[in-house]
Amino acid sequence: MKNVMKFGEYEAVIAFDPETELFRGEFLGLNGGADFYADSIRSLRKEGAISLRVFLDLAKEKGISARKQSSGKLTLRLDPDLHHKLSKLAKAKHISLNQVIVESLETAIG
């Protein structure tokens, strides 16, 4: 995935903030917010590690899970024509519409 920096088992999305003229990192999948700013890759790594450590220590101190739990449920709005085409595909493959969508999403993310 582009613009993602790994910190052990955790990942952060990196983007440039033109207002501050700094790179901003934001950790994904945490049970709360943890972000960091820096002006170079080396500084991003340092600041990201500090931000993550502070977040994990705080989560442990409060007795909460560091990772956000996903329900596995998703409300999806589709163009009616796309919905119809997906339904036909599901019928042709003898699988549910849900399974067609899951397979499509799995293919899309590789």
Image: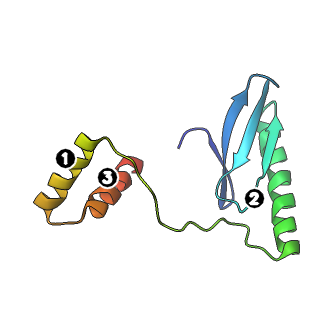
Earlier in the chain: of badge 3 and badge 2, it is 2
Residue kind at label 3, given as amino acid type? Ser
Earlier in the chain: of badge 1 and badge 2, it is 2
Residue kind at label 1, given as amino acid type? Lys
Q: Crowding at label 2, few (<14), some or many (≥20) Cα neighbours within 10 Å? A: few
Q: CA distance from mark 1 to mark 2?
A: 39 Å
**Above or below, 72 relative to 88:** below
Q: Crowding at label 3, few (<14), some or many (≥20) Cα neighbours within 10 Å? A: few
- Determine the image quadrant of residue 3: top right
Q: Is residue 102 left or right of residue 54?
A: left
- Determine the image quadrant of residue 31: bottom right
Residue kind at label 2, given as amino acid type? Gly
Q: Which residue matches tag 2? A: 32
Q: CA distance from mark 3 to mark 2?
A: 30 Å
Q: Which residue matches tag 3? A: 104
Between 65 and 74, the one lying in front of the other is 74
Q: Which residue matches tag 1? A: 85
**Above or below, 59 relative to 89:** below
Query: x, y (%) of residue 74?
Result: 46, 59
Q: Crowding at label 1, few (<14), some or many (≥20) Cα neighbours within 10 Å? A: few
